[in-house]
Amino acid sequence: MTARIIAAVAVLVSAYVHLHLWIQYHSAHQVVGVAWMVNAVAGVVIAVLLFTWQNWLAPLLAAAFGASTLIAFIISTTGSGLFGVHEKWVGSYVWAAFVSEVVAIAVGLYAVVVERRAAAAPERARVHS
């Protein structure tokens, strides 16, 4: 359960950063603005699922959320940018999002492995008895 709590906090931090920056800068951008709001809402939904849905797919969603937002940010820092948005590795919000997304990926995947092993243990015991 601790891994789920850490993953939930990580996706909520990323969701907060996306909401804050959407309000500050990106709400007027047609493509990326919508994506930033979707990230904010999805982060909250995934955090709720981590607490309420006892299925290994919830932490997998947290890892996928972290990976997709991190990949999108990395693409936006390239020369071509992402849909006209050119980001830089500068600022506390950038680093807060980066750290939270890496944590969501790592802890989400860890929770998936632990929960899948725990679910498989009773099945193995039944088969061998």
Image (cartoon, rainbow, N blue to C red):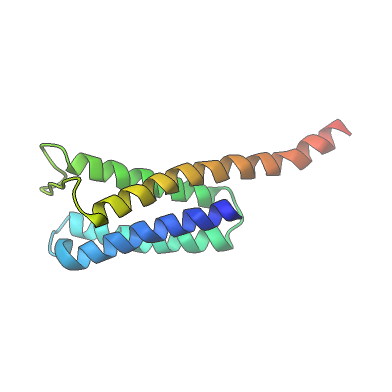
Q: Is residue 89 above or below residue 96?
A: above
Q: Residue furthest right?
A: 129
Count of marks overlaid on the render: 0
Viewer-closest of 120 and 5: 5
Which residue is rendered at x = 42% and y = 55% of the image? Answer: 10
Residue found at the far bottom of this picture: 23
Q: Is residue 58 left or right of residue 89?
A: right
| Residue at 39% in and 44% down | 102
Q: Is residue 109 above or below residue 47?
A: above
Percent position (x, y) of residue 87? 16, 47
Write the residue at 47% across / 60% down. Answer: 47
Furthest-top residue in this view = 128
Where residue 81 appears, as percent x and y from the top left, is 13, 42
The residue that appears at 20% across and 45% down in the rendered structure is 89
Residue 80 image offset from top left, x and y in percent: 11, 38
Q: Is residue 129 above or below residue 57?
A: above
Vertical order, 124 against 60 (above or below) = above
Q: Is residue 42 visible?
A: no
State left or right for residue 61 relative to residue 91: right
What is the x, y in percent for residue 129? 89, 34
Whether residue 126 is visible to the viewer of this picture, yes or no, is yes
Q: Quadrant of the N terminus?
A: bottom right
Instruction: Decide which of 129, 14 is in the foreground and name it.
Output: 14
